[in-house]
């Protein structure tokens, strides 16, 4: 399968040691493009995005740490029925990110919120945004104006996938507002 985002690009921005690859899943009902992307390109690991690298810890054998329904039950949280079988990807800032394995769409479960927000059309779009976020971090550290960085991020990511900014409460909208207000 061909992807716009490549493994080489991800490694160039994050470094090989900060990429988590997922074995190809042979489970039924898994979107082939999602499985191929996770197995060949992977997910980056950073201070802002923590990929789910060890599904065993901190759960016991009675908890399916991959699906969010089991994880939510473990913590005594309500999980929307339609999302019970979605897979946990990791955390972006304070939001749990999950992928619907059947469609490949990525959703955020913001801390303290009830329900979820559509964040990306697919896993590739998420990783594209994470690459652009890393570039923003680097340029921010090098003194580029926060307003310029936020505008660039919104334009670049929004062109690739407008879903990222469709909900005003999306993690991307909130993060860019914090950047513009000097909270970074």
Image: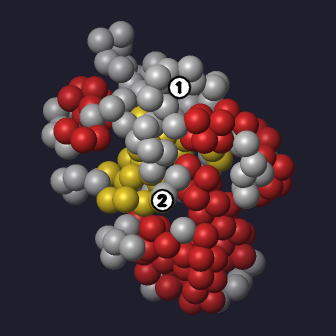
* Lower position in the chain sequence, tag 1 or tag 2: 1
Q: Which colour scheme is used?
A: secondary structure
- The residue located at (60%, 63%) in the rendering is 129
Query: In the structure shown, which secondary structural element does the residue marked by tag 1 occupy?
Result: loop
Badge 1 density bin: few <14, some 14–19, many ≥20, Cα 10 Å: few
Question: Residue 167's image quarter?
Answer: bottom left
In the depicted structure, whether residue 146 falls above or below residue 70: below
In the depicted view, which residue is nearer to us: 155 or 140? 155
Query: In the structure shown, which secondary structural element does the residue marked by tag 2 occupy?
Result: strand
Give residue 123's position: percent from left, percent from top. Answer: 55, 49
Give residue 1's position: percent from left, percent from top. Answer: 73, 42
Question: Residue 158's image quarter?
Answer: bottom right
State left or right for residue 133 relative to residue 177: right
- The residue located at (56%, 56%) in the rendering is 126
Q: Is residue 143 visible?
A: yes
In the depicted structure, whether residue 87 falls above or below residue 118: above
In the depicted view, which residue is nearer to us: 48 or 101? 101
Distance in Å between CA atoms under marks 1 and 2: 23 Å
In the depicted structure, whether residue 174 falls above or below residue 114: below
- The residue located at (54%, 68%) in the rendering is 161
Residue 3: which disc? none
- The residue located at (36%, 10%) in the rendering is 61
In the depicted structure, whether residue 52 falls above or below residue 92: above
Q: Mark 2 points at which residue?
A: 120
Q: Name the residue under label 1.
A: 54
Give residue 113's position: percent from left, percent from top. Answer: 22, 56
Give residue 183's position: percent from left, percent from top. Answer: 46, 77
């Amino acid at each position: 399968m061909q992807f716009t985002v490549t493994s080489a690009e991800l490694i160039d921005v994050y470094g090989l040691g900060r990429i988590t690859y997922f074995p190809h899943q042979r489970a039924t009902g898994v979107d082939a493009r999602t499985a191929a992307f996770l197995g060949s390109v992977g997910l980056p690991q950073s201070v802002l995005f923590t990929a789910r690298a060890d599904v065993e810890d901190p759960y016991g054998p009675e908890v399916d740490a991959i699906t969010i329904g089991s994880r939510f039950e473990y913590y005594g949280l309500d999980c929307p029925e339609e999302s019970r079988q979605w897979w946990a990807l990791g955390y972006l800032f304070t939001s749990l990110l999950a992928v619907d394995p059947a469609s490949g769409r990525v959703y955020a479960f913001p801390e303290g919120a009830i329900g979820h927000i559509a964040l990306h059309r697919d896993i590739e779009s998420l990783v594209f945004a994470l690459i652009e976020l890393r570039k923003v971090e680097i340029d921010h550290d090098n003194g580029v104006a926060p307003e310029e960085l936020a505008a660039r991020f919104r334009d670049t990511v929004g062109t690739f996938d407008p879903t990222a900014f469709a909900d005003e409460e999306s993690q991307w909208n909130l993060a860019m507002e914090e950047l513009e207000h000097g909270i970074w």
